[in-house]
Image (cartoon, rainbow, N blue to C red):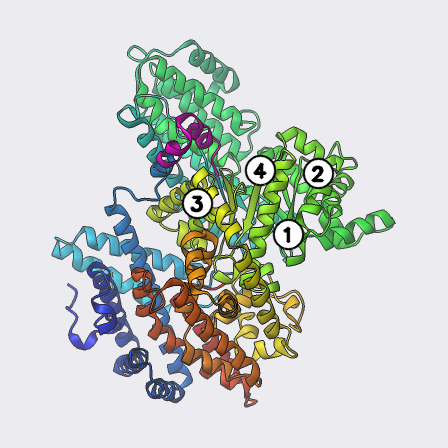
Amino acid sequence: MTTPLNVSQRIFDLSRNDVRDAVDGALRSDVSLLGNLLGRILREAGGEELLGDVERLRALVIGAYEREDNASIEDAEKLVSELSPDRAEEVARAFTCYFHLSNLAEEHHRVRVLKSRETSADSLPNAVSQLTAEVGAAEAAERLAALRFHPVLTAHPTEARRRAVSSGIRRISDLLGDRESAAAGVVATNEIDRRLLEEIEVLWRTSPLRTTRPTPLDEVRTAMSIFDQTLFEIVPRVYRLLDDWMLGDAAGSTPSVAPAFMRLGSWIAADRDGNPFVTAEVTKAAAEIASEHILLGLERVATRVGRSLTVGDLDTPPDAALRELADAQKALAPHITAKIGTRAPQELHRRVLLVVAERLAATRSGDTDIAYSAPEELLADLAVIQQSLRSAGAHRSANGELQNLIWQVQTFGFHLAELEVRQHSQVHRTALAEIRAGGELSEMTQEVLEVYRTIGYLQKRYGRTAASRYIVSFTQSSTDINTVYELAAAAFGSAEEAPVLDAVPLFETFADLQASTTILQEMIQLPAVQARLAATGRRLEVMLGYSDSSKDVGPVSATFALFDAQSRIAAWAKDNDIELTLFHGRGGALGRGGGPANEAVMAQPPGSVDGRFKVTEQGEVIFAQYGDKVIAARHIEQMAAATLLASSPANEAANGRAAVDFAGMAQTMDNVSRARFFDLIKADGFAKWFAQVTPMEEIGLLALGSRPARRGLSVESLEDLRAIPWVFAWTQARINLTGWFGLGSALAAVGDVGVLQDAYSRWPLFAAMIDNVEMSLAKTDGRIAERYLALGDRADLAELVAAEMELTREWVQRTTGNDEILQKRPVLRRAVRLRSPYVDALSLLQLRALRELRVPTGASSTEDANKHLLLLTVNGIAAGLQNTG
């Protein structure tokens, strides 16, 4: 039996005055329970001394946060400086463990709240109702049928947790759910508490740092765990929710009407831009892993549904089409049909579906004699079974689990997620130049050609939709698109033998965004592109990069530049009779286009969505959005609803009017914010100073992902640094500069609070930008930031950053009309206030390590200890802020 916790064991509790009344009682109880259990593990592992050091530091940072005085934070700094290297690491790990437990408690509470709600204002049924009221039932039905939400999973290194840590957190979360279900049983609760202690001990003793970088295929397997745990099951559940609402009392007894509106894409082990570890062979293996998972999933569902479909032929007579299918199956696989027939002699529907399951197994194993050639062939068989059941009056059998299987095939095919190859335009130019010059080809060029051959293989093996999109990074002219097709022809000897490809231009820099429509106009004159337009009904995809544009001109100018580019591209597509899909390369952090995605969809320019939204999902965002079934279902529903409503007449009219009304304001903000941003990043010595005041160099030591963090061996300018570590480093320094810098000066330049507040109330783009910056500012800490800035030798740049932060905070509050940051978002505000002092503790530990690394003693053991402490704190701060890059 678990020993009751006494008061002296309580740590990380929520008795603080500033959060006790603000935090929901159930969440407060969960966090306190887990914090107290962690305290018990700390005592068992390190004795009263470890627990005492953790508690002393916790009390000091809470006091400093509540009183906002320097004396308390200096006391906390003094305590941190006096810890031995080993104790400093233990304390850092204790706070990191707390954040992992707090995060899972918050996720658990979010699930609890979602389950308690019957519906919400931004639900998919409400979106359909609203659209129907605007455009009428017929047009709303047409738009719903064409709806497409297309998330694309990427392996960009923004997930700081090890997979072992994530798995441990999931086990603890499951136990917390079991404990809530077993609340009435003392024996069961005590057993669960014992297991919680065991799992928390494992979490505490599991190294939070990866010892080696994951390979691209490791990243594929991590993504597959999300598919297995949530996506495969919840996608048809979301469709069913919509179907039940649309059909009402007739749901289940009449054919389903909800479309399979989601498609999944993946760059994992296909994105080779800057990642030398992604080879053609790796991409092929990635496709095989994904196909194995989806085919096994479909096989298991078909087997389960088939075994339960025990309807007899007398009561549910099969129609002629089903008998014909059964005969075809017998001719194709006589041994299998005979074996199954002995188990279900008078249940033809069951027999046919079980043979379907066997054919899926053969497709998975590569038995070409009875394998399905394509998912369309499987769907045809399932449609025959479904129609026969309906003809016999077994409507619920036809429209129930069998329909779920059909939705899963329609959504995932035999490939699960379309692999989208991405490569830098310069690599293509170099390869094509080599080929044209003749002679022996370099290893790089041979690899480029092998990628095309791999695409051809994947299309033959899994169908054309398995891999047909080819993303061209840094597209700067239509020649960059034509090069894709020339290389494909070179790989196969002729264009006719090459695989079907849709080259997708990716516009990333400010200059490329400005030139986008000119490039697109030239692109559609290319014979290869014209052929694809004719074959697809003039469909075209264009990708926009949020990360590099923000690093290029600052977050404010990038926001307006992206909006302007989308407006112009949408108008160009309309003029050229193009069915446009814009692909949004958003990151998880605000400096890379992050923030609430459904709000971002609603803020898009008129004509730019048109019922289709494609977006990258990266790193920690994948686990946050899709790691839990309830949350994943909610996210998919929200995104689908926003995609449907973004193109409604009312929303497009509001966005269009506001963009015109506030164009002058936007131009002023663009000019001023960009100039302010350039004052900082173009200052002499900025790159060196940036490396001094943030853990940018040390972040490169973290084994976050297979992709290198920088383009060269050293960082001499921002061009050498990828967008993710640029954002990550500023986040770690508690400055979050990439999310807000320049906005304060821009708002102050407009100067008219009335105009700004009017824009905030009427222009979704501007409101989303202000709300995102407000969230970014809430996670900053001026006193901690001051200490990071003091690590550098440029007082002028430090003063520039600090002044802009204060100016931005002031003008954001004026614009929103709030006295405090996040005043009108109490749930988010309380979450930030709950975490901030504990993040401060980790920041002080990181600052200790950084100071000692910046002034090396020459002792390698000391340097190694400081690097290890720093990397531990990077991990902990990422967990505390729930942001990396």
Nearer to me, 475 or 519: 519
Instruction: Identify whether 170 is placed above or below 369.
Output: below
Looking at the rendered structure, the kind of residue marked 2 is: Ile
Query: Local crowd at mark 1 within 10 Å, few (<14), some, or many (≥20)?
Result: many
The spot of residue 608 in percent (x, y) is: 54, 43
Q: State the residue position of label 2.
A: 524
Q: State the residue position of label 1.
A: 507
Badge nearest the viewer, 4 or 2: 2
Query: Local crowd at mark 4 within 10 Å, few (<14), some, or many (≥20)?
Result: many
Q: Earlier in the sequence, mark 4 or mark 2?
A: 4
What are the residue bounds of the magenta stretch? 129-148
Instruction: Identify whether 385 is placed above or below 130.
Output: above
Q: State the residue position of label 4.
A: 466
Q: Earlier in the sequence, mark 3 or mark 2?
A: 3
- 298 part of magenta stretch: no
Q: Secondary structure at mark 1?
A: strand
Q: Earlier in the sequence, mark 3 or mark 4?
A: 3
Q: Secondary structure at mark 4?
A: helix
Looking at the rendered structure, the kind of residue marked 1 is: Phe
Q: Earlier in the sequence, mark 1 or mark 3?
A: 3
The spot of residue 396 in percent (x, y) is: 30, 23
Q: Are marks 1 and 4 in contact (CB under 8 Å)?
A: no
What's the residue at 25%, 81% (across, down)? 48
**Rendering quarter of residue 29:** bottom left
**Rendering quarter of residue 390:** top left
Nearer to me, 865 or 505: 505
